[in-house]
Structures are given as structure tokens and as C-alpha cells.
Image: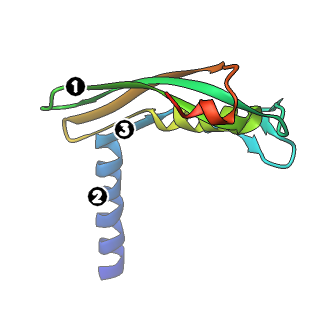
Amino acid sequence: MKKFLYLAMMALTLGFFASCTGTSVGKQPVIDENAGTVNGKAYDNETYKCWEFTWEYTEKATGDADVHESGVDYFWMTEFEIQKYKAEWDYAHNASASAYGVKYSISGESSLKETDKDVSECYDE
């Protein structure tokens, strides 16, 4: 009887917690290192180039001021490596969660641009 009562209380408790919390995340990128694909699209995984990665995001949390960050970074990578980086960055910077009246969200976006810089100039910015 005690086991049944314990299991019933645990089920109610878990049900209560599950109903009070919520999360939302985007679709996780599908990356195939061997094929050089990101979400099924193939990219060059041999030629290194200088890439400009522009990003911005906003974090919001109940009771706190919004935080907005932005920047531009340069990377010497193959097209596959930079597309993988971008997909993982976008996934990590777009999510929300809430529990017991407290909400948190982060929303971001990024873009890529190929530059004509060589490896010695790529990180000069």
C-alpha cells in the first residue's frame, strides 16, 4: 500500500511540474561530418577561405532588463565548417523556457559572407 501511495504521489508531483513548465527550441541541425552536409545540403570541405560571421541576439528574463549583444567575427575555415558553426550557433541562440511565472528567452540571428582575405589578413579585423 505504501508503494502504491508513493507512486501515486510521485506521478501527481511530476504531472504538476510538467504542467507548469514549458520549453521551446528550434530544430537541431543535422550534421554529417563524413559527407560534409548540414541539414542535407553539401558544402565544400576542402578549400579554406576567410568568412565574415555577423551575429546578434537578445536575451529576455522575467524581472531583468533585456540584454542585446551583436558582433562580427572572422574565421579561416572551409565552407562546411563555417556552415556547421552557423547552424549550431543559430540553434543555441533560439530557445525559450518558463516555469512558475518566470520566463526566459533568447532569440538570435546570424549571417555569413565570404571575404577575399587570405589567412594572414583574416584575423586582422
Q: Is residue 96 above or below residue 34?
A: above
Mark-to-mark CA distance, 1 and 3: 20 Å
Mark-to-mark CA distance, 2 and 1: 33 Å
Query: Residue lying furthest bottom in this view?
Result: 2
Q: Is residue 99 left or right of residue 36?
A: left
Snapshot quadrant of residue 96: top left
Snapshot quadrant of residue 101: top left
Q: Is residue 31 left or right of residue 19?
A: right
Q: Disc 1 on helix, strand or loop? A: loop
Which amino acid type corresponds to the residue marked 1 in the rendered image? Asp
Label 3 Cα crowd, 10 Å radius (few <14 / some 14-19 / many 20+): few
Residue at 35% x, 51% y is 15
Give me the disc on residue 13: 2
Label 2 Cα crowd, 10 Å radius (few <14 / some 14-19 / many 20+): few
Which amino acid type corresponds to the residue marked 3 in the rendered image? Gly
Q: Is residue 81 among what the camera can see?
A: yes
The residue lying toward the viewer, choosing from 7 and 57, is: 57
* Relative image position of residue 44 (x, y in whole percent): 84, 33
* Relative image position of residue 76 (x, y in whole percent): 66, 37
Label 1 Cα crowd, 10 Å radius (few <14 / some 14-19 / many 20+): few
Identify the residue position indicated by label 3 in the image. Answer: 22
* Relative image position of residue 104 (x, y in whole percent): 29, 34
The residue lying toward the viewer, choosing from 109 and 49, is: 49
- Give the mark nearer the N terminus: 3 vs 2: 2
Image quarter where the N terminus lies is bottom left
Identify the residue position indicated by label 1 in the image. Answer: 66
- Give the mark nearer the N terminus: 1 vs 3: 3
Q: Disc 3 on helix, strand or loop? A: strand
Q: Which mark is in front, 3 or 2?
A: 3
Q: Is residue 61 above or below residue 113?
A: below
